[in-house]
Image: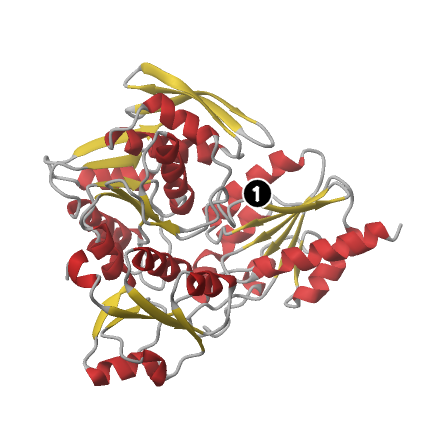
Amino acid sequence: MNLAQLKQRRVHFIGLGGAGMSGIARIMLSLGVDVAGSDAKDSAVLSGLQTLGAKTYIGHDAKNLGDADLLVVSSAINENNPEYQAALGAGVEILSRAQALAILMSQSRSVAVAGTHGKTTTTSMLTVALQKAGFDPSFAIGGMINRGGTNAHLGSGDSFIAEADESDGSFLEYRPLGAIVTNLELDHVDHFPNIEAVLELFLEFVNSIQPGGFLVAGIDSPGVVDLLNRISRKDIKVITYGIAGDYSLSHIALTANGAHARIAANGKVLGELTLTIPGEHNLFNATAALIAGIELGANSAELIAGLATFSGARRRFEIRGVVNGITVIDDYGHHPTEVRVTLETARRFAGAGRVIVIFQPHRYSRTATFASEFAKALSLADQVYLLEIYAASEAPIPGVSSLLISREMSPEKAKYEPSMLQIIEDIASDVSKGDLIITLGAGDVNSIAPVLLEMLEQRFNQK
């Protein structure tokens, strides 16, 4: 199916409110496609799509399919879903989320941003930088850009920037002109038994880049170095970045609220990069975005200026509020490396204050595999509250719970507490001015932040 054919279809989405699905639906609506969809619960995302013309349903029912002649489903949807079964019975064509996105990307100069960590931030940075450089790219991101408040847009330009999720291998559908691989580690252990399987998949991804295209690779990651050593293609341009890549960073300076570095291209100083978001890792994410923008034809000085305006993405070290000098931050980190980097950044941000973490492990398989690594990373905090595991779509694994992590930590530092309300009460009664509280994880732990802020307001306003 091509883009012209898609515009003639009546499309139904199962799981319309999801981050990836809603973005694709938003772009289709901008193209004039007839869009409908369902989700398990109502949300602001669904309301926004409804305003754009989508027909939405709460709950899943076979009759929701209506007269749709194309179904789009995410990998999280079970085949027993009644709408999925109705589509099968009616002979409706079915596309995965990635296949639908690939159609939307097909007539653009596309860049797919992949890697174990940093995909959402890097995709968002590239989008904002290109906009500042006078481009109007289309984009589809797995999170909201703070500045624009959206996760997808149909641009007037000929470029398309997309976050490429490796978790189920579906990013092989995209066939981009260019790709970024930020780093490579073992994750999504429900799909990948070892790092070798991850490397094999990413090699396929590199081989899916269009002839004459480009690959931007972060060589400070050992996994990326292994990947580069396996690439045999000579018809794509490979550009590396890192402390000593083709694009190198020096004079790195980190503050509580930002970061700075000098960027050189093949030994020649390109410019000074100053970010208004913290963390050394974000300097490298920004460098990847800069290189991809240059390869798309943008001016490097304008891209650097654009990166300086980037104010972050939702759930990526996002400040949710400050009460009486107590800062509440939310972050999506759910892999040990992400937890470590986030807490290093939090430690710098907090200064002399305490770092208090509410961590919700994501998936039983990930917790079982990385329990020791999680314990070590979380030990960077002063106090850790461990919620029970957020299952996502996984069935429980006998003997696997958040206790696997807490048992490997000091009992004075870590507390296993499955009750969100109890955690909120404990923290609100004990926290002091200057402390930083961070809700951490890819599940629903972020729902704690507004309630906690409200309780802190009540506590300090009563005095």
Q: Position of residue 156 (x, y in %)?
A: 29, 42
Neighbours of disc 1 within 10 Å: few (<14), some (14-19), many (20+): many
* 405 lies above or below 220: below
Q: Is residue 253 left or right of residue 170?
A: right
Residue 254's place in the image compared with 118, above or below, is above
Front-most of residues 324 and 150: 150
Left or right: residue 232 compared with residue 215: left
Q: Which residue is identified by label 1? A: 343
**Which quarter shows the N terminus?**
bottom left
**Residue drawn at (26%, 75%) of the image:** 68
Residue 392 in the image, given as x and y percentages of width and height: 45, 67
Give amino acid for label 1: Leu
**Coloring scheme used:** secondary structure
Determine if residue 114 is in view. no
Residue 430 shows in the view:
yes
Residue 118, by quadrant, is: top left
- Give the secondary structure at mark 1: helix
